Image: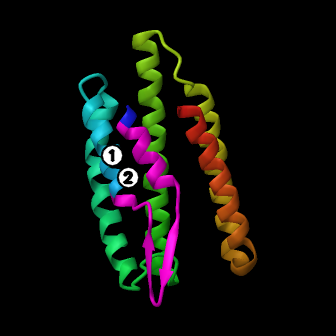
């Protein structure tokens, strides 16, 4: 579970270095997703949910690797036009699905081990994160230049809250 948490920290924290046409994430998402994948693999014998998430972790690691390389060379696939909107939306839906499955896996581990891993609080934060993502995405679509910085700041706060609960 430790590797999964380290990976989620790397995925959630976005620190970018912009240069010319390219952009480099100083905490690369592909490395984070590899940690998440390792966490899924280590927990798959204890819980069927994590076994099913191994494929999702592999997909996320591969997809984020492509995005990382493309961003380095200035080919940002997300956010530009309808194709970018579709790619960003599908990636977000997939990430929310995986996060929810992680919470279900944590709940199952709580039940099996008689332990408390704060799954109820994680569920509440997941719901808040989902709602704020949907609302800010709608507003961002309607008013892109105004909301961008507000959205980044709020998501950073939400991610910190989710990570604080897991440690």
Q: How many marks?
A: 2
- The residue at which mark 2 appears reads as 32
Residue 137 picture location, percent across and down: 64, 66
Name above or below for residue 14 compared with residue 118.
below
Q: CA distance from mark 2 to mark 1?
A: 5 Å
Drawn side of residue 123 relative to residue 54, left or right:
right
Q: Quadrant of the N terminus?
A: top left
Of residue 111 and residue 162, the one placed in the foreground of this image is 162
Drawn side of residue 24 relative to residue 132, left or right:
left
Q: Residues within 10 Å of mark 2 (few under 14, many from 20)?
A: many
Which residues, given as a range, are shown in magenta?
A: 3-30
Name above or below for residue 51 compared with residue 108.
below
Residue 121 picture location, percent across and down: 63, 30
Q: Is residue 27 magenta?
A: yes
**SS for dot 2:** helix
- The residue at which mark 1 appears reads as 35
């Amino acid at each position: 579970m430790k590797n999964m948490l380290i990976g989620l920290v790397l995925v959630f924290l976005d620190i970018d270095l912009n240069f010319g046409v390219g952009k480099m994430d100083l905490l690369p998402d592909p490395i984070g997703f590899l940690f998440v994948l390792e966490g899924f693999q280590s927990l798959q014998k204890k819980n069927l949910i994590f076994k099913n998430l191994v494929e999702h972790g592999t997909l996320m690691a591969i997809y984020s690797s492509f995005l990382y390389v493309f961003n380095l060379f200035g080919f940002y696939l997300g956010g530009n036009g309808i194709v970018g909107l579709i790619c960003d939306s599908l990636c977000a839906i997939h990430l929310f699905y995986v996060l929810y499955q992680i919470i279900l896996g944590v709940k199952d581990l709580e039940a099996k081990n008689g332990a408390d891993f704060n799954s109820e609080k994680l569920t509440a934060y997941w719901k808040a994160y989902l709602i704020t993502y949907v609302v800010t995405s709608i507003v961002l679509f309607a008013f892109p230049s105004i909301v961008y910085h507000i959205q980044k700041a709020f998501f950073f706060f939400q991610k910190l809250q989710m990570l604080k609960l897991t440690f």
